[in-house]
Amino acid sequence: MYPGLRSLGVLLHAVLTGSYMPGYHSILLINLPNEQTAKDIARCVMERRLAASVNILPRTFTMYYWKGEIQDASEILMLVKTKTSRVGDVVKYVRSIHPYANPEALSFPVEDGSQAYMKWMDDAIPDD
């Protein structure tokens, strides 16, 4: 509701306790059909300041059920690092430009990490 207050609360928590507030940041896993599509979508996500960083990992082998049958594919895995409050925005945007009918977008909260890195992420992603 008041994202600026939430950010201030997280900062105060970190300063007063010297620790990270679990769940404030998240990592999304998104599979894409090829490297160029991954680069294009990653660049769009970054240009919209929806993430602090995106990693594009080399080819993965994927097996999944689709329309009642086992399918397999070679895909590219993208790791999107963002604020948990921005996960919905990332997913909505990626779904709007993703070539798959039902793209994977799984998010996992960050439980702990480097305070300096988390601060850098906060500075890179504007409050929503």
Image (cartoon, rainbow, N blue to C red):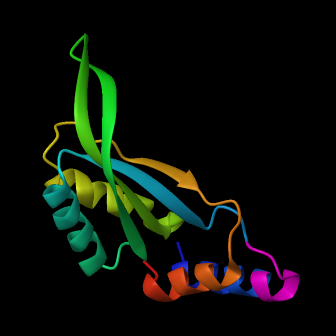
**Does the magenta segment cover residue 42?**
no
- Residue span colored magenta: 14-20
In the image: residue 73, left or right of residue 15: left
Q: Is residue 112 above or below residue 20?
A: above
Q: Position of residue 104 (x, y in %)?
A: 33, 41
Residue at the far front in the pictured view: 58
Q: Position of residue 46 (x, y in %)?
A: 30, 76
Residues 73 and 48: in front is 73
Residue at the far top in the pictured view: 68
Indicate the quadrant where residue 128 lies: bottom left
Q: Position of residue 20 (x, y in %)?
A: 74, 73
At x 31% / y 52%, what residue is drawn? Answer: 58
**Does the magenta segment cover residue 15?**
yes
In the image: residue 15, left or right of residue 70: right
Number of marks in the rendered image: 0
At x 24% / y 20%, what residue is drawn? Answer: 71
Q: Is residue 46 above or below residue 72?
A: below
Residues 68 and 8: in front is 68
Q: Is residue 94 above or below residue 24?
A: above
Kindly tell me whether residue 8 is visible in this rendering.
yes
Kindly tell me whether residue 126 is visible in this rendering.
no
At x 61% / y 78%, what residue is drawn? Answer: 118
Indicate the quadrant where residue 78 lies: bottom left
Residue at the far right in the pictured view: 17
At x 69% / y 81%, what residue is drawn? Answer: 115
Q: Position of residue 32 (x, y in %)?
A: 23, 47
Indicate the quadrant where residue 125 lies: bottom left
